[in-house]
Amino acid sequence: MTGSCLHRRCRLPRVMAATGPQWSLYPLLAIIAFCTFSLSGLHVFFCLPFHILFAPLLAGIVALLTAFHAIFLRYPNRTDFVLQVIAAVVSSAFFFTSGLETFCLTKSRDDATSGGDICEGVTYRTESLVASCNGFFGNMQSVVLRNANWEMQSVRIFVSSCLTALAASQLLITTALSFYSAHETKLRIRTYHYQLVLGLLLLISALFHWQYCCLYYFVSLPAACGLLCLTQGLTTRLRPSPLSRSLDVTGTLAAIGLFSSLLFSVLCTISGIFDWRLSILRHCRWGDGIMKGCRRSLHFSYPYFNWQMPQIEHEITSIQIAIYTVILIFSLLYFYFSMKSTFQLRKRKERNLYFESHQH
């Protein structure tokens, strides 16, 4: 301890030993990442539908770098946290593609369910790439399969299922380690940080909401909520003020409106599938001319102009339901963070008034 610290209290840095259950996740992450990296070669060799994305290879490399960077540290630091967040984001994309790939490989091509139609879309979008890959590796694949007495489809399902399990494990571990590093490095994640991220996610989802002609897409409510959420975060970040609180209250109301409109959109979509006849459903036809024009342009866009109409409608409906579900989750988070920010600003104002009164 230095001489300057003898006469006043010094805040010493917190040093965490490289022990405990949290640190045991780093070697586990390294093992999972190595397995993912190893299976990425088989993923390309057997020409799985999403082989061109090289998702297992990328996820394995990022996770290996993250794990070994942390293993050689005595305690977490900010760089470790950033690497873990990047690994979690990459792992989430890897998990989505692997899960969809496994789901479609286990489905029959002639399946009449909505899942089959989604897989028809995946097959149509990737069949030319898969054919090119099979043309390149075809002879070697035949030799390997013949010597091992395996079937191509069984091998593909096995590889894809293993990658899906590894992706899920990798996503859980990197997410847990991200929270652990944020806690140990005393990283202050405020509500406005969540609002900024959520605003960007709402804007991205609003693009899909517009692209796939979701109900009332022309109102652009998800985009408006995304911009408002970004404004709330920026205003609170720069300078908390009564304007920030007013924006948070407005954001709370906007989140309720977004959630209600999406619930009604889901009801309209489901009623169209099951042919329900309810008086309230007449509002589903509001802006019907605009909706028909959007659907018509979507039908003639790539890759739908070569599809049959039932396939187009089934895939668009499935994608719309997925978009509604994602934005519904975002609207709930938006409501929560807006309410939380509102009461945090109120408590901060009361605390400032308390200190000012005692100073006088």
Image (cartoon, helix red, strand yellow):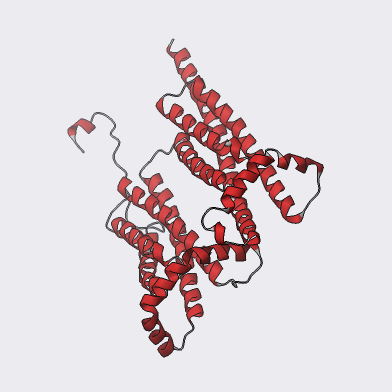
Q: Quadrant of the N terminus?
A: top left
Q: Measured from the top left, where is residue 175 in percent x and y? A: 44, 53
Residue at horizontal 42%, vertical 39%? 189
Answer with left or right where residue 144 lies relative to residue 203.
Answer: left
Q: Residue at x 81, y 48 (%)?
A: 277
The part of the image, by quadrant, that contains residue 187 is top left
Residue drawn at x 24%, y 29% as measured from the top left: 7
Percent of width and height locating residue 256: 63, 35
Residue extending furthest toward the left: 3
Is the residue 92 above or below the residue 210 in the image?
Answer: below
Residue 238 occupies quadrant: top left
The answer to whether 243 is drawn above or below residue 173 in the figure is: above
| Horizontal side, residue 65 vs residue 211: left or right | left
Left or right relative to 70: residue 274: right
The picture quadrant where one finds residue 67 is bottom left
The reply to whether residue 55 is in sight is no
Q: Nearer the viewer, residue 343 or 139?
A: 139
Asked if one can make out residue 145 in the rendered structure from this viewpoint, the answer is yes
Q: Quadrant of the C terminus?
A: top left
Q: Is residue 145 above or below residue 192?
A: below
- The x and y percentages for residue 229 are 51, 34
In this picture, residue 281 sits left or right of residue 99: right
Position in image of residue 289 (x %, y %): 67, 40
| Vertical position of residue 55 compared to residue 225: above or below | below
State the count of labels: 0
Front position in the image: 9 or 262: 262
| Residue nearest the viewer, comparing 213 with 54 | 213
> Which residue appears at 55% of the width and 68% of the height?
104
